[in-house]
Amino acid sequence: MPPVLDPALAGSDQSLSSAYVATVLPELAAHYGLDSDALLARAGIDPRVLAQSDALLPLVDVLRLFLVVLDASADSGLGFEVGKRVKPRAYQVLGYVILASSTLGEAIDRLVRFEALSGKLGSTRLCRDGDQVRLNWYCPLTGEPGRFLTEAAITGWVAFMRPLLPSGLAPLLVRFRHGAPQDEARYPAFFQSPVQFGAEHDGVDIAASLLDTPLNTADPGLAVLMEREARALLTDFESGTNLLSAVRAQCYQQLADGEPTLEAVAGALSLTPRNLQARLRKQGMGFQEVLDGLRQSLAELYLQDPALSLTDIALLLGFAESSSFTRAFRRWRSMSPNQWRRRG
């Protein structure tokens, strides 16, 4: 069984672009000799979601998927292997506005300003120190999830930027706060630079002079258009694309008092029920679908805890009785909660 996640993650408003997962998963599965569809099924993710390039996957679903891969691969460097397979299309508009940038410095500036477009999994900051520049990654999670996200983010930076720069350019140093993984030698081999584990910061150090390096894909005309598009998308992010995450977070908070209602969630978000439902429909979802998705994610996490009875789980999910929970779970997974629990 994959490592158990904290159920509170299901109430987080953090997310990741479905385009990112759709881009890296096939190559990652092939690398480990696994089947992508089987991994998605095990994690409870509908493959059709990955076909929606502008959709965002909740953080808990992203982590469940990659912890399923971790369970099957037993590779503590999973995040590193994910990051190696990042392509521009994984970041959609963010990727293309970076591609069109004139210099590495301009590309990094746009990464920092627009990274929320790919989800809200962490934040990037640029720190200058004399003739060196440090690009730091700040991840709010710890443990195995934090390790995975950090390695995927930092390795992804290098995998993304390397083809855009003249050959031979590499970071001065790559830093990870966590300990060294299995097969540590593959890290400096990929980064083409020293890698420090147990460091004080997560990120990469580069020579400040590299910020003026022209990108092979520079396109000033396209950059203007993509910058405009990125700004518009960022403005709409909280009120539009990220609305699903906000609704999930509110539903999670209200589950302790019973079943969340459209009216209560809308009020918490300073919206009318009609307005909230209309905006959810624009995202291809309804309120009940969002609530059901949250409950399913939580149910599968709670079922991994043997100390929780079905009655306990039903109450945690806001159901009035365990039979209602069992019927809902059969609808989600075509099996009873106990059958799911016994899968191991």
Image (tube, rainbow, N blue to C red):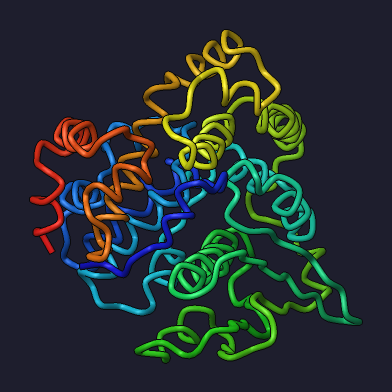
Quarter of the image that includes the C terminus: bottom left
> Image height check: is 131 above or below 71?
below
Quarter of the image that includes the N terminus: bottom left
Give residue 292's position: percent from left, percent from top. 34, 31
Q: Which residue is drawn at 60% across and 83% down?
A: 177
> Image height check: is 343 above or below 269?
below
Q: Is residue 102 visible?
A: no
The answer to whether 128 appears left or right of 201 in the picture is right
The answer to whether 51 appears left or right of 242 in the picture is left
Q: In which quarter of the image is residue 308?
A: bottom left
> Image height check: is 286 above or below 343?
above
Camera-nearest residue between 147 and 97: 147
The answer to whether 240 appears left or right of 330 in the picture is right
Give residue 189's position: percent from left, percent from top. 46, 85
Q: Which residue is drawn at 54% across and 10% down?
A: 278
Camera-nearest residue between 247 and 338: 338
Give residue 31's position: percent from left, percent from top. 24, 67
Q: How many labels does the image show?
A: 0
The answer to whether 104 appears left or right of 165 in the picture is right
